[in-house]
Amino acid sequence: MKLEKVLSIVLWVLLAVSAVLIVSMMTNISENEADPTMGAWINTTLTWSYILLGVGAVIAIVFALMNTFTDREAAKKGLITLVFGAIVLAISYVLASDAIPQFFGVEKFVEDGTLTNSVSKWIGTTLIASYVLLGLSVVAIAASAVTRVFK
């Protein structure tokens, strides 16, 4: 049997199981929040969703790694992307301040330990990285439009 046929059968089985679980959950939903049947169906459906998400993520990562290791050009592009991301993150980290921002209610977060200088530094890092990536995206879009005009 061909691989495509096996994959098609597996996908149809997954779809059927998902449909049965959704229909069963919908028929057992009630207004009573303490109903154990409804809670069991919701938990079962959520567990199935987590399983599908996990399997899908693992398959996506495995095939991406296989493609990277079998194709030299893809490995080179992937490495360039990782290095670029690390450079943007490093520059953002250097530029970020570790000062705790002053706003209404900040004392509560400082007292319970959820807002520290380290947390503030990483929040600043991600904000600066987002701004840098947004700026680079805008520049790339504008450059694409300009080069298309001159072609």
Image (tube, rainbow, N blue to C red):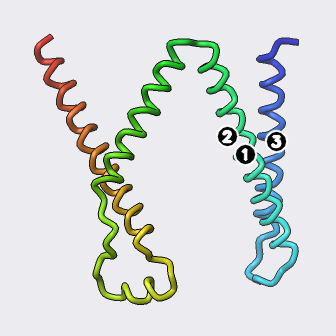
Q: Quadrant of residue 65?
A: top right
Secondary structure of the residue carrying numbered label 1? helix
Q: Which mark is residue 97?
A: none
Between 37 and 122, the one nearer to me in the picture: 122
Residue 54 is labelled as 1
First of labels 2, 3 by sequence position: 3
How far apart, in angstroms, are the residues tagged by discs 2 and 3? Answer: 20 Å
Q: Residue at x 31, y 72 (%)?
A: 99
Question: Which image quadrant is residue 69 in?
Answer: top right
Nearer to me, 31 or 106: 106
The residue tagged 2 is 57
Look at the picture and state if 36 lies above or below 62.
Answer: below
Q: Position of residue 46 (x, y in %)?
A: 75, 59
**Amino acid type of the residue tagged 2 in the rendering:** Ala
Q: Position of residue 79 (x, y in %)?
A: 48, 26
Q: Nearer the viewer, residue 73 or 50?
A: 73
Residue appearing at x 79%, y 33% in the figure: 12
Looking at the image, residue 23 sits to the left or right of residue 130; the answer is right
Q: What numbered label is drawn on residue 16?
A: 3
To which quarter of the image does residue 66 belong? top right
Callout 3 amino acid: Ala
Query: Are dots 1 and 3 in contact, CB under 8 Å?
Result: no
What amino acid type is highlighted by mark number 1?
Answer: Gly
Residue 141 drawn above or below residue 52: above
